[in-house]
Amino acid sequence: MNRSRALYVLAAAFSLLPLAVSAQTVVVRVRGPGATPVFGALTHLVDSSGSIVKNALTDERGRALFIGMPPAIYRVRVEMIGMTTGESEVFEVADGMAVSQDINLESSAIQLEGIAVELDGGRCTLHPQEEGLAIAVVWDEARKALSAAAFTDEQGAYRYETMVYDRRLDTTYTILSEQETHREGYMRTPFDSRPAEDLMNNGFVQADGRDQVYYAPNATVLLSDAFLDSHCFRLARDDGTSEGLIGLAFEPTGDDKSVVDIAGTMWIDRETAELRWLDFHYEYLDRAISSSDVGGRVDFRRMPSGMWIVPEWWIRMPVVALGTDFQGNPRRSVNGFHVTGGRVLEAREAGGRSLALGVQTGGVEGVVVDSLGMARRGVRVGVVGSSQEVFTNAEGRYSITGLNPGRFQVRFVDPVLEQYGFASDLLARDVIRGEMTTLDHHLPSVGDVLFDACRGQPRPETSVVLLGRVIDARGRPVSGASVRVLWTDYQLRTVNRLVLFGGDSSGLETTSDARGHYMFCQVPTDIALEVHGELDEERSQVYPLRIQLDLRARLLGIEIARN
């Protein structure tokens, strides 16, 4: 049988230097008291004009990564609930440059514990960040949570599984009818709101044909200038159901009562400074249906990933009956309530990673970086014994979910290092039910791989490492093939007073391994080489090759085949 053999040769200068970074990168590391990493901190990259260029949330290791930023002058501002705001000095990001910034945050949650609620005649403060120290402190913590929730919402990269319900209640809150609907898909937010300007101009209750649609505020609305300009804030008295919490109440200002607005309270944990929920009711409804019972609630929850979502919400609307008074005039009254709401049963990132709502399985996640600490994209990550296999994204992240509890071995395959015959060792990790186990991986450089492979072998300073792979005509690896590289050393010789220019043949020989890889550690440079391979009685054609020693790593791919 006449089989076709092909030989691919890759050559690289052994004196490797790091390749230039193709895009500007800013790596931010955030640490709290005791130098512990802070995850879920909202990190802003700010330009020289003070404008926010990009936002990111820190991961479990306290890191935020900004990739592909244009060369400019920047600074970093970091906000975290219960901690002081941190800010870096200005720094320059030049073309092809990677910059690292370390930010340390101090705890400030103690400030909330000492705040006492003093109602000054119900006085309300406009723009809480401008006056009223206690109000400003509470608002600042609420704002951090709302900003993180708004950031999560803006990404639009989360797949929610929700249960949405519709209930009819009588005036005693007895359920007369109930209907549930399960939905699943990518959503910016699991409930609908409207832009802040629209709500301020047209109201939180708007006509849709013959129906009235009641809207709840999301985080973006509560943070907007339109909302802050038309609402004032004060500290709220404990209503008996909020032990350990402090309330920041808000209500509309101004004389325009032609559109329906909202008033409510944001409840914040005194100890952790985390926003727990918002309850609200509608203002400026028709007097006949106006009631504190007409309103809603929006819960907020910080996930183990550091993201903020709305896990549950509801709106209670009046069911209006038309009748007449004792004089026969038309009269409207409330004869029940219509409640719509829902819960998030599960939330996942685009890569499949669960945000840990009701999960019964576990998973492995982490970040893969190269020898310079830069994110490595396109690394194949798999779990032995599982069919799941994923690739790292632009930030080097990967996530494998849906694993049953137990010990697993994780495999990392880098396509660049693989062509040099490098394979990472399998790494073992325990998977716990309902948790994501972190496993970060650092890849070696090409130079490290070559150096380790040639360790202990004498290597002239001007030589290079020559390596490659033997494959057949169908691209399958060929093991056990003899690979030879030959050259002639030319030099001047004196024979019987005659100066002669001659040479001696030299060469190296090795055998391809089970994956078809081979390597030579002492190949001379700037000299004509001949490379060929043999297996049994078959021999590939001889291919000439000359390798120039360069400061950069050079890869030369040559196909040698005989049909």
Image: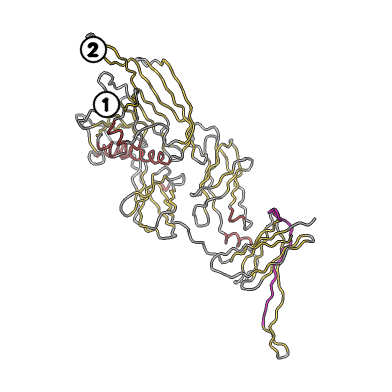
The residue pinned by badge 2 equals 329
Image x and y of residue 142, in percent: 33, 37
Height in image: 244 above or below 462? Answer: above
Question: Label 1: how many residues lie within 10 Å, few (<14), some (14-19) or many (20+)?
Answer: many
The residue pinned by badge 1 equals 283
Query: Mark 2 to mark 1: distance in Å?
Result: 25 Å
- Which sits in the foreground, 118 or 66? 66
Left or right: 191 with respect to 119?
right
User: Disc 2 or 1, which lies upstream in sequence?
Assistant: 1
Height in image: 75 above or below 16? Answer: above
Height in image: 382 above or below 286? Answer: below
Check residue 412 for magenta coloring: no
Label 2: element kind? loop
Left or right: 116 with respect to 547?
left
Can you tell which quarter of the image residue 80 is in?
top left
Specify the farthest residue to the top: 326
Residue at 26% over, 28% down: 259
